[in-house]
Amino acid sequence: MDTIPPANPVFNKEMEDAAINALRNERYILGESVDKFEEEFARYVGTDYAVSVSSGTNALHLALIAANLPVSGEVITVASSYIATANSIIHANGTPNFCDINDEYIIDVNQIPEKINIKTKGIMPVHLYGHPADIDEINEIANKNKLFVIEDCAQSHGALYKGKMTGVFSDMGCFSFYSTKNMTVCGDGGMVTTNNEKFAEKIKLLRNHGQHPKDVHTLVGYTARLNTVNAAIGRVQLKYLPKWIESRRKIAKRYFEVLSDVDEITLPPSDSNIKKPSYHLFEIKTEKRDELLNFLRENKIICLIHYPTPIPYQPVYKKLFNYKEGSFPKSEELSKQAMDLPMFPELNDNQIQYISEKIHEFYNR
């Protein structure tokens, strides 16, 4: 068996041709492919507007500014995520206020009300690993307390909640196109989705130094545009995305079938009547995480850990906010026990069977 990687980003001839065509025939910055990519992504997700930016982190950052987060305003978010989730709040001069996760690896909505105070201005749930957050309950809390909601959709391209895509339920949804995501632009890139025209127009200004028309600056903005060549690649990737998401779901279903008898591991949340994950990652939990990880690597199965340290316990957050271990026990447990099995659309049944055999072999030793 050849080495099985954790992910396998696709770059094919069609994407190469699109990139070369954009380089030869379009403006390098804000070319025609950028406009078309935005239109096509909005149509795919199901929002009125989509505005591309230079990264998923910038998508969150600019969305927070568009939502008028005041200096030192608090945004409730989740302790278990990539650090960019919380960093974006600090970039926007706000303060993150963390909740723990529930058994589905997503923000525990029962903790949100107790976190709300006079400084609270918004909620930023994360659809972690492609598992949709409990967005109806979050919106209900937000509406009651007059808070904005911004969905972190960096890992949830194609995930469904009550039959609709993530990124459509709140004030804004923020996607990442980093190279390991469900779709990529072969470089950094992001997208903000919204049904609010004012938010869309403000983000367009913010990404381009607040400039419109040319040489007229009405906001203090940023250099946060998506390059035309990346947008051209993204358009092709988006065409493949529905098929790739379906493949991920079939792979996840197969993992559930072949690993359900291993009592020593906890499998991730599966499909329900309300939620249909997109399985950006297939995250399992086990008390022997490090030993299993090394055993699989020795057998040419490369697994990774997302994320070994909850955000509040990162050195910079301890220094800024004095968080102490023990404050977010479920996030701590996930960080110590979680690992992701290989997950990419081309993963075949022979590879899945081999992974299963090795996991069984490890626990039967």
Image (spheres, rainbow, N blue to C red):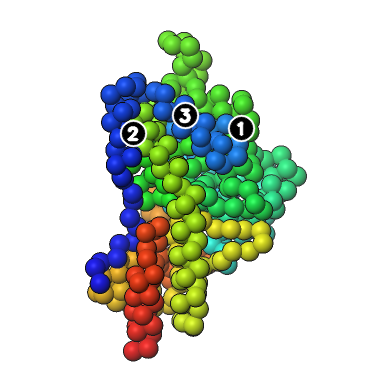
CB atoms of marks 1 and 3 within 8 Å: no
**Residue bearing the label numbered 1:** 48
- Where residue 225 sits: x, y (%)? 40, 28
Residue located 33% across and 49% down the image: 10
Helix, strand or loop under label 3 = helix
Count the marks.
Answer: 3
Up the image or down, 110 lies above or below 158; here it is below
The kind of residue on which mark 3 rests is Lys
**Residue bearing the label numbered 3:** 36
Q: CA distance from mark 3 to mark 2?
A: 13 Å
The kind of residue on which mark 2 rests is Ala
**Residue bearing the label numbered 2:** 18
- Residue furthest to the bottom in view is 365
- Where residue 315 sits: x, y (%)? 38, 54
Residue located 41% across and 28% down the image: 33
Mark 3, Cα crowd under 10 Å, few <14 / some 14-19 / many 20+, is some
